[in-house]
Each structure stands twice: as C-alpha cells, then as structure tokens.
Image: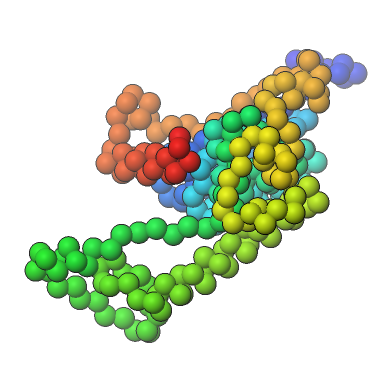
C-alpha cells in the first residue's frame, strides 16, 4: 500500500519477464510477438516499474518474430522511460540473442552460450524415396520462381542461389540490429558475425555482453537491497500442465529440443 500513500517512498520494483523456448509464430508454447504482447505491456506499464529484466533462455527461431519482439521491447522502453536488462541462462543464440541485444545491458552466466549471429535454413529431400515407392510428383505453377526448394524434386543450383540471397539479406538485417544496439561495445573480431558462439566471459570480451552476473544480485546492486520483483511468464497450455500433449504440441516440443541440441543442451 505504501506505493499509493503520498510522501512515502516505496521500494524500487523490477518487472521480470521470462522468455524461454524457441521463437516461432502460431505454435503454442513458443515465443512470438503476438503471444508476448500483453505480457510485455504489463511488465513495462503496470505499477510503474524502475526497470524490466529479461530472463532469456532461447536457441532462436524465426528472424521476423525475433525482430518484432525486439522492436516491441525497445518501443515500450522508450515510451515509458524504463531501462531494460537482459540476463541469459543456458543459451541466448541466434534469435535469442537478437532479443537480448534489444536490452540496454546484457549479463551472462559464466557458462551461457551467446551469439550465433547468422541465419540457417534446413529441410529434407525426399524425391528418391517417393520414386522408389512408384509415386509421381505433379506440381504446376504460374511464374518460374513460384516453387522454391520443393523437397519432392531434385535440388537445383538456381533455387540454392535464390535461397542464399534471401538468407544473406536476413543476415544483413541481423548484423545491422546488433551493431545499432551494441555500437562501440563490439570488438573488432572477424568471427563476430559468422554464426560463431561465445561462452560467458568470452562473450563479454567481444562485446556481446556487458558483464557476468545473475538477475537478483545485479538488480540489488543497481536499485538497492530493498528492490522487489514482479514476475511475468507465459502460461503453458492447460493440457501440458498435466503432462498431456496433443500431436502438434508433441511435434513442437521435439523441434524445440532439436534447436537446443544444436548447442549441446
């Protein structure tokens, strides 16, 4: 109640937003701009917090959703005048680092994985399998570039070149975002934007993080021992809280594990 009593100074308050999982649109349990919209609005605006702290544990995912989430964080921070601190856990790589770099300062655990500033596209080729099964693939398009990298047809050099140009453009956007956010803190390292990853102190050394530290101690150092925390986190789907998973959720969980596994987690 002290917060509402005139002339009584209340304890500093930090909103803590937990961002765990892969980044994708339209899949339950993943991080997306739509699923985080109301959560972030509350974190920045409810109770006039002194800061917002992001707990990030994400191997990445959709570059567009990463960009939208990062842009929303910056927009809310500027509109409210509330600073943002990111605290990385196991991994803040690829899209996870895109979001982390939207913060004013980034802190890592000594064993956190950061970076992977690159873009990847993966898929499967099944044309040999369907041929062996006696299945004929039929596809008709209007426009020679309409069908790109069809997994049921042999890969063409032209399609691969087109994909490379697309990935290159997304990579350029990622690099521009990191340079804008991290500025002069970045080291002149030739591997910085190659998709390489850095661990803990090494991430600090190349400028991807500002220090080694955990959320509570760092926030107490900044705002005093009386600082309080209000936590915000996405709710898990009802069935998954009881251990039940629909087919789509199970597939999403498998894909998420595969993304974390890329970093040995």
Q: Position of residue 129 (x, y in %)?
A: 17, 63
Residue sitting nearer the eye, 209 or 255: 209
Residue 147 occupies quadrant: bottom left
Q: Position of residue 254 (x, y in %)?
A: 34, 41
Can residue 165 be spotted in the picture?
yes
Q: Is residue 171 above or below residue 208?
A: below
Residue 229 occupies quadrant: top right
Q: Is residue 259 above or below residue 216?
A: below
* Residue at the farthest front position: 190
Residue sitting at 46 percent across and 70 percent down? 163
* Residue at the farthest bottom position: 143
Residue 124 occupies quadrant: bottom left
Q: Quadrant of the C terminus?
A: top left
Residue sitting nearer the eye, 26 or 63: 63
Q: From the viewer's perspective, is 79 left or right of 56?
A: right
* Residue at the farthest right position: 7
């Amino acid at each position: 109640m002290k917060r509402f009593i005139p002339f009584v100074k209340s304890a500093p308050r930090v909103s803590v937003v937990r961002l765990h999982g892969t980044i994708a649109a339209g899949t339950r349990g993943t991080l997306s701009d739509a699923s985080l919209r109301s959560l972030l609005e509350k974190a920045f605006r409810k109770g006039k917090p002194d800061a917002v702290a992001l707990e990030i544990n994400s191997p990445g995912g959709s570059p567009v959703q990463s960009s939208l989430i990062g842009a929303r964080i910056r927009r809310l921070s500027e509109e409210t005048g509330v600073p943002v601190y990111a605290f990385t856990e196991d991994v803040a790589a690829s899209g996870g680092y895109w979001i982390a770099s939207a913060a004013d300062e980034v802190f890592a655990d000594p064993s956190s994985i950061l970076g992977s500033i690159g873009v990847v596209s993966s898929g499967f080729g099944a044309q040999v399998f369907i041929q062996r099964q006696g299945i004929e693939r039929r596809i008709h398009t209007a426009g020679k570039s309409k069908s790109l990298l069809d997994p049921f047809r042999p890969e063409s050099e032209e399609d691969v070149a087109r994909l490379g140009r697309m990935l290159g453009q997304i990579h350029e956007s990622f690099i521009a975002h990191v340079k804008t956010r991290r500025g002069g803190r970045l080291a002149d390292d030739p591997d910085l934007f190659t998709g390489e990853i850095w661990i803990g102190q090494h991430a600090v050394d190349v400028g991807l993080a500002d220090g080694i530290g955990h959320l509570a101690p760092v926030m107490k150092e900044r705002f005093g021992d009386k600082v309080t925390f209000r936590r915000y986190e996405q709710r898990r789907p009802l069935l998954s809280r009881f251990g039940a998973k629909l087919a789509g959720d199970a597939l999403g969980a498998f894909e998420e594990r595969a993304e974390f596994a890329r970093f040995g987690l």
